[in-house]
């Protein structure tokens, strides 16, 4: 057992990623295709392995946020159509072109900077997210025309992004659709091959009218619930588990403490297990005295302050936990959604926060 333990290990089930994509594909209407979003290293799961699993599950496009992410995927052998959704510096334009990736613009001046390269360009209309894109439909129209007139450029699509799709019952998704649809129809009439896309994971599952030609799903392909409840409600399978091991077990008498600041003290005789994983690995300090760890199939409460490299858990007065037992921080009934609720955040911040010090191990239903 000791030879097999890992200090900090994220196990990623690529078969689950594949099945999640199949489930999302089954939900699509009107012949829409699935674009798998693998930005931020696949939301912490690993971009290239998850991209390949998504393609095996029926995705036909891959999307990222940055030019360097596209270059990484091409170097890893991912051959599918790529879309870079984020802003690009002038230097990154050549990186995008070398990766044969689509890019996004919303400004005639940026079209001029792109001109002369062979690039497929998507125009973004800001219908309410308030980040990238233009709110000015006339400017969006002029940008489309500028692409048509530019040397080497091809209009590949038009897009928007929803601000509240994950808030079930909120009416703003409908408002954004109403703002986007006339522009999308207008462009489609002039450019029948242009791809119209808007939906993220939440909109894909919530509103078929948002599917258009393509949906861009990120969080759901990893089996995380875009509505922050329970992935099972959406027919999704969490792909990632986070594991460590028991490095020490020691008794604690009443009044004895654990961790920085002595934020936990034993009220009765008990035992403490030290697990060598901490905020240096992505176990947030706000989980101090505020999380459970599964050892030998049983939940134990985290005891004391999360430190950079270690946590401690309260095993109780009688325990069968032993040195080198596996400790599961996410998985075995503890979900990323549970962590998110405890941290007052969202599940994909949890997985994105797992650091490079956590080894990733890939498997298929093992």
Image (tube, rainbow, N blue to C red):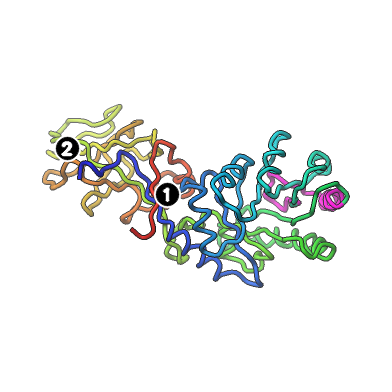
**Tag shown at residue 63:** none
Camera-nearest residue between 280 and 76: 76
Q: Magenta stretch? A: 123-148
At numbered mark 1, what does the secondary structure look like: helix, strand or loop? helix
Q: CA distance from mark 1 to mark 2?
A: 29 Å
Task: Characterize the local packing of mark 1: few (<14), some (14-19) or many (20 or more) Cα atoms within 10 angstroms.
Answer: some
Q: Is residue 151 magenta?
A: no
Residue position marked by numbered label 2 in the rendering: 249
Q: Is residue 354 visible?
A: yes
Report the number of discs.
2
Horizontal and vertical percent for residue 16? 43, 60
**83 horizontally vs 135: left or right:** left
- Outermost residue to the top: 261
Residue at the spot 88% in from the left edge and 50% down from the top edge: 149
Horizontal and vertical percent for residue 336? 41, 51
Residue 219 position (above or below residue 279):
below
Residue at the spot 57% in from the left edge and 44% down from the top edge: 75
Residue at the spot 83% in from the left edge and 43% down from the top edge: 108
Residue position marked by numbered label 1 in the rendering: 341
């Amino acid at each position: 057992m000791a030879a097999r333990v890992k200090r900090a290990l994220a196990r990623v089930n690529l078969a689950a990623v594949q099945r999640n994509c199949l489930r999302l594909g089954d939900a699509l209407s009107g012949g829409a295709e699935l674009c798998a979003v693998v930005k931020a290293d696949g939301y912490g799961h690993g971009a290239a392995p998850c991209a390949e699993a998504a393609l095996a599950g029926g995705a036909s496009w891959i999307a990222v946020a940055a030019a360097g992410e596209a270059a990484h995927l091409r170097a890893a052998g991912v051959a599918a159509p790529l879309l870079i959704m984020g802003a690009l510096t002038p230097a990154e334009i050549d990186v995008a072109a070398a990766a044969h990736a689509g890019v996004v613009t919303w400004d005639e001046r940026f079209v001029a900077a792109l001109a002369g390269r062979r690039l497929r360009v998507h125009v973004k209309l800001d219908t309410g997210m308030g980040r990238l894109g233009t709110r000015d439909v006339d400017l969006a129209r002029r940008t489309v025309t500028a692409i048509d007139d530019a040397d080497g450029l091809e209009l590949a699509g038009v897009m928007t992004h929803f601000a509240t799709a994950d808030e079930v019952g909120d009416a703003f998704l409908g408002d954004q659709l109403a703002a986007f649809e006339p522009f999308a129809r207008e462009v489609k009439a002039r450019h029948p091959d242009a791809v119209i896309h808007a939906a993220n994971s939440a909109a894909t599952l919530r509103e078929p009218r948002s599917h258009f030609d393509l949906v861009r799903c990120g969080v759901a392909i990893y089996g995380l619930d875009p509505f922050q409840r329970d992935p099972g409600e959406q027919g999704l399978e969490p792909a990632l588990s986070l594991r460590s091991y028991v490095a020490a077990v020691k008794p604690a008498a009443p009044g004895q403490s654990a961790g920085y600041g002595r934020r936990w003290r034993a009220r009765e005789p008990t035992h403490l297990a030290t697990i060598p994983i901490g905020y240096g690995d992505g176990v947030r300090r706000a989980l101090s005295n505020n999380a459970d760890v599964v050892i030998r199939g049983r939940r134990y409460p985290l005891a004391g302050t999360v430190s950079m490299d270690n946590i401690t858990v309260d095993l109780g007065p009688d325990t069968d936990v032993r040195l080198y037992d596996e400790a599961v921080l996410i998985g075995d009934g503890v979900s990323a959604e549970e962590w998110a609720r405890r941290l007052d955040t969202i599940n994909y911040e949890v997985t994105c926060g797992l650091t490079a010090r956590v080894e990733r191990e890939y498997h298929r239903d093992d």
